[in-house]
Image (cartoon, grey):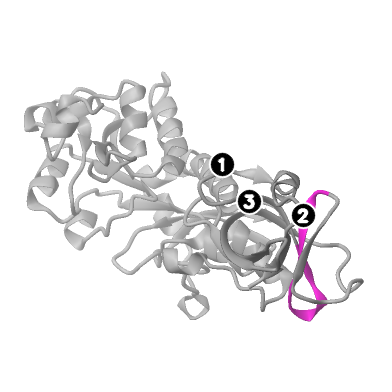
Amino acid sequence: MLPPTLSLRRFFCCCSALEAAATTTTKRNLVFLGSPQVSASVLDALLDASQATNSIFQLAAIVTQPPSGRGRGRKLMPSPVAQHAIDRGFPQDRILTPERAGEETFLSDLRALNPELCVTAAYGNILPNKFLEIPPCGTVNIHPSLLPLYRGAAPVQRALQDGITETGVSLAYTVRELDSGPVIAYERVVVDDIIKAPELLAMLFNIGSAILLRELPSIFDGTARLKAQQQDHAKATMAPKLSNDESWLSFDQEAKVIHNKVRAFAGWPGTRAKFQVIDMNGHPNILEIKIITTRVSDASGSKESGDEITFVGSALLVPCVGHSWLEILELQPPGKKAMNARDFWNGLRGQKLKLL
């Protein structure tokens, strides 16, 4: 259940508390902006570092998305970052939840904090110039790609969908144009062909947290601006937000392409496919299944293609384009919990499974 301040107030702040937070210490004031659970690792790193005896900064406030309706009852719940901050004992009157980062009330409260630096990590709200002009040391963003590649809302998902073998995380200054500010530092990461988007996101934000803490002294003293590298905008690629309509799988593609999409869309929105179940009398029924875990068969090209799906080893073997085969290891039928392929196959009780 929401704490009273979360359910009744649009912002968890009052000017007197914010002003007090800005003036009680000589440490530099830092404001963190983030919303989903993956941002919590960055928040943890900042909270832990700020509490060290030799810390050069204090976390003056947290900015996150407003409470939203979630779950079956659509009850108002704080964002994952807000809930994580509350669980760690962060003062609720310093958790700010504007609908838009350009609201004058919010900007006034932010100015009262006298933030020297703002840090964003998957905040999910556009920052206008009025915001960016407030912190004298600027605003820096942890972005899970090697900028200028994969600018936008879904860099990890789109990179996995493209089948990349290397990605990384960038720490860059925020400017008005999307993810196009100078890069302070970055780190490359090799990507294997089984990692899914939620796992890779968590890894990259953990690495990004370490980069941020390492670079904070230079950001505060201004030397980071001198060494930051301008992006080559001609090499920029975009990573648009995922949509639920994209979750459908089509087996008129090669198995590798389908496998990459399953990895990329893991978590939300997931991937779905429709199959035919042929009963003992030869009558077909359409079955919609959520596909959770796959791999590309190492026996590609050794079998005849067709439309029938078989069970081999521990996987459903699905024929795809180019004599390639996709192995489905984990799936979720409608109205049931996720299960492995063997349990699903046994549940068919001799019925045939074919491509639609």
| Residue bearing mark 1 | 337
**Label 3 near label 1: C-beta < 8 Å?**
no
The amino acid at mark 2 is: Gly
In this view, the residue in front, 22 or 337, is 337
Crowdedness near tag 1: few (<14), some (14–19) or many (≥20) residues, C-alpha within 10 Å: few
Residue 65 placement, left or right of 98: right
Quarter of the image for the N terminus: give it: top left
Residue 301 placement, left or right of 32: right
How far apart are labels 2 and 1 at the CA level? Answer: 21 Å
Q: Is residue 26 above or below residue 96?
A: above
Q: Secondary structure at mark 3?
A: strand
Q: Is residue 324 magenta?
A: yes
Q: Is residue 31 above or below residue 249?
A: above
The amino acid at mark 3 is: Leu
How far apart are labels 1 and 3 at the CA level? Answer: 9 Å
Q: Please, which residue is most extreme toward the right here?
A: 302
| Residue bearing mark 2 | 350
Q: Is residue 269 above or below residue 18?
A: below
Q: Is residue 182 magenta?
A: no
In this view, the residue in front, 55 or 3, is 3
Quarter of the image for the C terminus: give it: bottom right
| Residue bearing mark 3 | 331
Crowdedness near tag 3: few (<14), some (14–19) or many (≥20) residues, C-alpha within 10 Å: many
First in sequence: mark 1 or mark 3? Answer: 3
Residue 114 placement, left or right of 40: left
